[in-house]
C-alpha cells in the first residue's frame, strides 16, 4: 500500500482501530519506568554539606549522660594552681571563655573534693588545646574497658571496595555529656578560678573506651563503615553502594547527634588513609609518610639500626610481605 503525505489539514481517513484491523500498524503497549535512586552522587564535601548543613560545625551531642565510677578506696586529691607563662595567659583565658560559651566547661564556685590541674598543648593549626591533667583522678577511676578493633579484624571488610570516604568526628569526646556528680570530679584550677568539664575531656583513662563504644553503637546501624576513634571510613564496591552507605551514615548521625569536621573529610576517593595505612581496591599499603618518619627515627638510633627495616614498624607487621 502506498501512503501519500499531503501538506494540508483535514480529518483522518483511517483511524487507529481501522489501521489495526487492516494490519497497517501494530501497537505495542510497554511501560518504561526509570526508578530514581535515593543515593546522592557526591563528589566533594560541599555536596554533602549542602544536604546536611547541621552535621558540620558545632559540637555533637550523644544521647544520655556518662557517669564516672570511682574505686571504693579512692582518696580525693586537691592540686594547687600551676604557674603559667605570662605571655600565654591572655590566649589561655580566651580559650577558656570559648569553651565556656560552648558549654564544654563551666565555672565552679562551690567546694569540691577533687581539684585537678590544667594542661594545654598546641594544635597543628597553632591554636591552644586545653586538656585536663587528671593523674591522681585516673588512679581512682574504675576503667570501662572497650576493645578497639585490630587491623586483622577490619582488613577483610574492605574486600572488594573501590570507593572510599573518610569522615572526621568534630570534637569527638565533647559529644558525650557527663552527669552532675561526674563533672564535679573533673574540676580543675586555672589562673582565672576553677572550672569543671560538662563534656567528656581528653586525659581521662575512660575517655577512649567510652568514645569508641559510642561510635561502635552508632556504626552498627551503618553498613559499609568502620570507625576508629574519631575517624570513620565509608566504602563500597560500586559508586552507588558507596553513596548509599554515605547517605545512611549522615541520616544516622543526624538522629544520634554526631557532627563532622568539614575541613578533615575526604569524599569519594579511590584510595584513603585510614588506621595508619593506605587503602584502595587492591587492599592495604604502607603510608609513605609514616615509613619515611619511622626510618628516619630508626636510622638516628645507633643502638638498633635494624629498626629501619620496614616491617619492624609494629602497625605493618600483618602486611610485612607487601613491604619487601
Image (cartoon, rainbow, N blue to C red):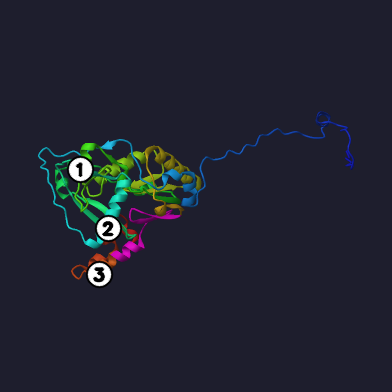
Q: Which residues are magenta?
A: 270-293
CB under 8 Å between discs 3 and 1? no
Q: For mark 3, what is the residue?
A: 299
Q: Helix or strand or loop: what does disc 1 sit on?
A: loop
Q: Earlier in the sequence, mark 3 or mark 1?
A: 1
The quarter of the rendered structure image containing the C terminus is bottom left
Q: Which mark sits nearer the N-terminus, 3 or 2? A: 2
On whether residue 283 falls in the magenta region, the answer is yes
Q: Which mark is residue 13?
A: none
Is residue 92 shown above or below 257? Answer: below
Q: Is residue 114 visible?
A: yes
Q: Which residue is mark 2?
A: 90
Give the labeled residue for mark 1: 109
Expressed as whole percent of the image width and height from the top left, the position of residue 231 reads 35, 50
What is the crowding at mark 2: few (fewer than 14 residues within 10 Å), some, or many (at least 20)?
Answer: few
In the rendered view, tell whether residue 135 sits above or below residue 295: above
Task: Report the side of 110 relative to 149 (left or right).
Answer: left
Quadrant in the rendering for residue 29: top right
Mark 2 residue element: helix
Between 244 and 211, the residue placed more toward the observer is: 211
* In front: label 3 or label 1: 1
Of labels 1 and 2, earlier in sequence is 2
Residue 166: horizontal and vertical position, in percent? 40, 51
Amino acid at each position: 500500500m502506498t501512503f501519500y503525505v499531503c501538506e494540508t489539514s483535514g480529518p483522518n481517513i483511517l483511524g487507529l482501530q481501522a489501521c489495526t484491523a487492516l494490519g497497517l500498524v501494530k501497537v505495542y503497549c510497554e511501560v518504561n519506568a526509570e526508578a530514581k535512586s535515593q543515593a546522592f552522587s557526591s563528589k566533594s564535601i560541599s555536596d554533602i554539606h549542602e544536604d546536611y548543613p547541621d552535621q558540620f560545625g558545632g559540637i555533637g551531642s550523644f544521647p544520655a549522660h556518662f557517669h564516672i565510677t570511682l574505686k571504693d578506696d579512692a582518696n580525693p586529691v586537691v592540686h594547687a594552681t600551676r604557674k603559667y607563662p605570662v605571655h600565654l595567659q591572655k590566649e589561655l583565658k580566651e580559650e577558656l571563655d570559648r569553651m565556656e560559651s560552648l558549654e564544654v566547661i563551666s565555672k565552679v564556685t562551690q567546694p569540691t573534693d577533687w581539684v585537678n590541674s590544667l594542661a594545654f598543648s598546641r594544635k597543628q593549626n597553632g591554636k591552644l588545646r586545653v586538656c585536663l591533667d587528671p593523674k591522681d583522678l585516673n588512679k581512682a577511676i574504675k576503667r570501662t574497658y572497650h576493645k578497639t578493633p585490630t587491623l586483622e579484624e577490619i582488613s577483610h571488610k574492605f574486600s572488594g571496595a573501590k570507593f572510599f570516604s573518610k569522615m572526621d568526628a568534630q570534637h569527638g569526646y565533647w559529644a558525650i555529656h557527663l552527669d552532675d556528680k561526674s563533672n564535679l570530679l573533673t574540676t580543675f584550677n586555672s589562673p582565672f578560678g576553677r572550672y569543671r568539664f560538662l563534656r567528656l575531656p581528653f586525659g581521662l583513662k575512660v575517655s577512649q573506651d567510652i568514645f569508641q563504644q559510642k561510635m561502635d553503637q552508632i556504626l552498627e546501624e551503618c553498613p559499609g563503615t568502620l570507625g576508629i576513634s574519631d575517624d570513620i571510613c565509608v566504602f563500597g564496591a560500586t559508586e552507588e553502594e558507596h553513596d548509599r552507605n554515605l547517605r545512611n551514615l549522615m541520616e544516622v548521625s543526624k538522629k544520634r547527634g554526631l557532627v563532622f569536621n568539614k575541613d578533615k573529610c575526604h569524599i569519594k576517593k579511590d584510595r584513603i588513609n585510614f588506621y595508619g595505612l593506605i587503602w584502595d581496591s587492591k587492599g592495604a599499603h604502607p603510608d609513605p609518610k609514616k615509613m619515611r618518619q619511622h626510618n628516619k627515627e630508626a636510622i638516628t638510633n645507633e643502638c638498633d639500626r635494624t629498626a629501619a627495616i620496614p616491617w619492624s614498624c609494629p602497625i605493618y607487621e600483618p602486611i610485612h610481605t607487601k613491604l619487601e
